[in-house]
Amino acid sequence: MVIPMGNLSGMTAKVTLSFSDETIEEARRFAKREGLSLSAWMDQAAREKALREVFTAHAEAVARAGLDLESAALADAQEVALVDDALFGGGRPRVA
């Protein structure tokens, strides 16, 4: 994903939004600190929030399905180590 930095390039919609005074001041402060326009910072913040929602929904679906991806990854790593030991004999470094 490419997020425009500091300008309005790539932005196509102009909308009117309302924020609390506290929220808009914090947003302005963060935008300035990151060298972005307020619009670019708000665009980035909205995209990040949307991605968090998608990733959270995915993680919840994986959990509901009973999948244990961490255990599967650890088992794969252990299997690779066993194959390396069998092929390259214990402490011998692998050649990539």
Image: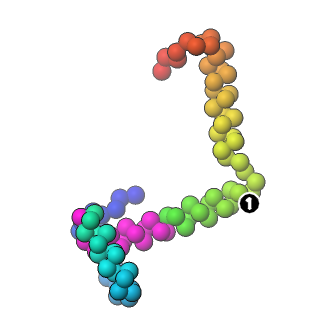
Residue occupying the point 38% across, 86% down? 19
Above or below, comparing residue 9 to residue 95 in the picture = below
User: So how many labels did they put on this image?
Assistant: 1
Position in image of residue 73 (x %, y %)? 64, 39
Q: Pointer 1: what residue?
A: 64
Above or below, comparing residue 91 to residue 26 in the picture = above
**Type of amino acid under label 1:** Arg
Asked if residue 17 shows in the view, the reply is no
Position in image of residue 94 (x %, y %)? 52, 17
Boundaries of the magenta span: 35-50
Give yes or no for residue 78 being in the magenta stretch.
Answer: no
Q: Secondary structure at mark 1?
A: helix
Residue occupying the point 63% across, 58% down? 59
Describe residue 74's horizontal placement relative to residue 13 as left or right.
right
Would you call the spot at circle 1 few (<14 residues within 10 Å), some (14-19), or many (20 or more)?
few
Residue occupying the point 55% across, 67% down? 53
Above or below, comparing residue 74 to residue 82 in the picture = below
Asked if residue 23 shows in the view, the reply is yes
Prevalent SS, magenta region: helix
The image quadrant of residue 57 is bottom right
Residue occupying the point 71% across, 57% down? 63
Quarter of the figure with the N terminus = bottom left
Position in image of residue 68 (x %, y %)? 71, 48
Position in image of residue 20 (x %, y %)? 39, 87
Q: Residue furthest right?
A: 66
Above or below, comparing residue 64 to residue 94 in the picture = below
The image quadrant of residue 71 is top right
Describe residue 25's horizontal placement relative to residue 78 as left or right.
left
Q: Residue furthest front?
A: 22
Describe residue 64's horizontal placement relative to residue 31 as left or right.
right
